[in-house]
Image: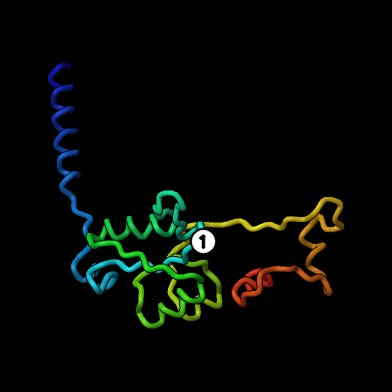
Amino acid sequence: MRTTHWLMTAILGLLLTGCAGISTAPTPEARQAVAPTGKLRVGLQLGNPLNVMRDSASGEMKGVGFDLGKELARRIGVPFEPVMYPSVGALLDSGKSGAWDVAFVGFSPERAKEWDFSALHLEVEFGYLIPGGSSISTMADMDRPGFELPCRRSPARIAFFLAR
């Protein structure tokens, strides 16, 4: 029994040692394709909590897109360079000239005509804030001719809310 226990421990140790040596580093070709400048330039919309927010006290940057970009850069072995934009429109426009390598933006069929998207990394549920006593209690109450849904004027936002 003691010999079996020692033998199993030795085998497990060898397996763990072997697994530790497995490299998951990308090939130089893959690294060049993702980060052609030698650093990963990540397009982010400043002020969007799903992308990046700046802590007013410390100045520290944090957010889902910021953290994902930093981790992607670490995994492919290149420096991380956040590239900030005031709006998603500015971010997408600058991407057409190659100003960034990857970006974290919401998927839409319209955007998919111009951009390649990975699998979703985040799902956001939207809802409506309705005052108490409103005649609106279901989505069907809003989905009728003549009903107007107020929202910030932005072609992408309006298209998003009107999409069915």
Quadrant in the picture for residue 27 = bottom left
In front: 29, or 162?
A: 162
Quadrant in the picture for residue 131 = bottom right
In front: 119, or 39?
A: 39
Q: Position of residue 7 (x, y in %)?
A: 13, 26
Q: Position of residue 44 (x, y in %)?
A: 43, 66
Locate residue 32 relative to residue 137 in the image: left or right: left
Residue at point 46% right, 57% down? Answer: 53
Q: What crowding class fits label 1: few (fewer than 14 Cα within 10 Å), some (14-19), or many (20 or more)? A: some
Image quadrant holding the C terminus, namely: bottom right
Residue at point 17% right, 16% down? Answer: 1
In front: 76, or 129?
A: 129
Residue at point 55% right, 78% down? Answer: 110
The furthest residue to the front: 57
In front: 58, or 142?
A: 58
The furthest residue to the bottom: 97
Q: Position of residue 54 (x, y in %)?
A: 44, 56
Q: Secondary structure at mark 1?
A: loop
Residue that mark 1 sits on:
48
Residue at point 23% right, 62% down? Answer: 78
Tell me which colouring the rendered structure shows.
rainbow
As drawn, 159 above or below 132: below
Q: Position of residue 116 (x, y in %)?
A: 43, 74
Locate residue 107 relative to residue 2 in the image: left or right: right
| Count of numbered tags | 1
As drawn, 122 above or below 153: above
Disc 1 marks a residue whose amino acid type is: Asn
